[in-house]
Image (cartoon, rainbow, N blue to C red):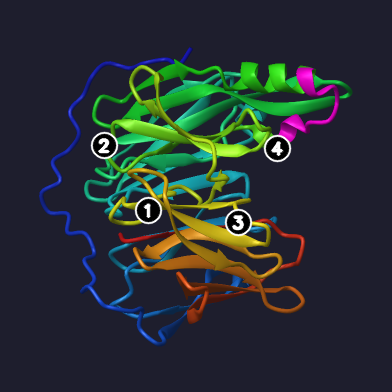
Amino acid sequence: SPTSTPTRTAPSAAGWTPRTPAPAQSPPAKGAPVALPGGLGTAYEDPADAVRLAYLRAGQNRAYARDPRTGAFADIGPHTVVAEPSPDGRWLAWFNTLYAASSDHLALSFHDRLTGERFSVPVLRPPYQSLTPAWSRDGTKVLLSAQRYERFGDKDVPVTVGYVIVDVAARTARFVATGDALEVRQAARAAAGKLDPSRYYSEYRWAPDGRTVAARFLTAEWGHGVRFRDAESGRVTRMMHWVGQAQGLTDWFSPSGRRFVTSGCAAYLAACVWRTSDGSREATVRVPTGATTLGWYDDRHLIHLVPDGESRRRVVVVDLSGKRVRTLAELRVPDEAVVDLRYGPG
């Protein structure tokens, strides 16, 4: 179980001014070029953009996080480091995914960009791992999915056993167990080899209210749906078994919280937009082959990462009809490289 530290009071937010772009009906038509670190390409930014690039790692390159005040990128470690800025940009949370090689526990580290203070909170011990941290919208808590490997036939497969809630002010971590792994084991046994359990590990994310968490789950039809739980107890509060697999890196929901986006929801390659309140479909957006949905630009536009020729990818904004309206970045990375980008308002 996670180790907790004594309660402390977080520094006052007085003096921190988040970036507040002026609201616009549509993304600016173009942006000024900004060289990306590590020779990874070029971003195109306008002060009126609803979001901007906050974190970048690609392939075996170093990981970089951006200071929201200066716009400068800082090297924060090797490609095994994953990081997530808080929504207002004040905090940076990060950890090394290969923690077991050098430590007996996974610690989530924090940097307060207002005061300069740094501290860490122990959260998991082997054999448990996590892939990425996710901030609550008010910047007070961080969520990590807890996974371990289990044997299915002749393969070791990642399964989700719960999630950890880190309280930034108190500097404590609390584990909440779920039955995700048991459901996958039971379904794999019933399917007698016809179900690939590696497709059904869950990643938890905050819902917009900050009191609920959401994750994809294995439905009775052996498909993907989105399930909501009370964050504190882990109790299931809602299930949408028809929507498909939630998409986006750390926040699946639009800025207003009224919508979320999934894949695997149509007979063709598409991203589907659903109403959070009742799960009704609002849009079906065709997605190019090889593209990835990174998240939301604003409530009417999505951000996609799309192939753009050999060893090149492009970050684009599309509207809910699928029309490409803006290029946010051009990346020079090998075709096989995993690209991890974080766009945020801060």
The image quarter in which residue 23 lies: bottom left
Q: Secondary structure at mark 1?
A: strand
Residue 74 covered by magenta stretch:
no
Which residue is at the front of the view, 263 or 66? 263
Disc 2 and disc 4 in contact, CB within 8 angstroms: no
Disc 1 and disc 2 in contact, CB within 8 angstroms: no
Numbered tag placed on residue 259 in the rendering? 1
Disc 1 and disc 4 in contact, CB within 8 angstroms: no
Query: What is the spatial separation of the Cα atoms under label 1 and label 4, in whole angstroms?
Result: 24 Å
Query: What is the spatial separation of the Cα atoms under label 1 and label 3, in whole angstroms?
Result: 33 Å
Magenta residues (range) = 190-198
Q: Secondary structure at mark 2?
A: loop
Mark positioned earlier in the residue sequence (2 or 4): 2
Mark positioned earlier in the residue sequence (1 or 2): 2
Split into 4 quadrants, where in the image is the C terminus? Answer: bottom left
- The outermost residue toward the left is 14
344 to 181, vertically: above or below:
below
215 to 106, vertically: above or below:
below
Q: Identify the residue under disc 4.
A: 199
Q: Identify the residue under disc 3.
A: 62
Q: Amino acid at mark 2?
A: Thr
Query: What is the spatial separation of the Cα atoms under label 3 and label 4, in whole angstroms?
Result: 28 Å
Q: Secondary structure at mark 3?
A: loop
> Which numbered disc, 3 or 2, marks the residue closer to the eye?
2
Asked whether residue 204 appears in the rendered view, the answer is: no
Disc 3 and disc 2 in contact, CB within 8 angstroms: no
Numbered tag placed on residue 210 in the rendering? none
Which residue is at the front of the view, 227 or 142? 227
> Which numbered disc, 1 or 2, marks the residue closer to the eye?
1
Mark positioned earlier in the residue sequence (1 or 4): 4
> Which numbered disc, 1 or 3, marks the residue closer to the eye?
1
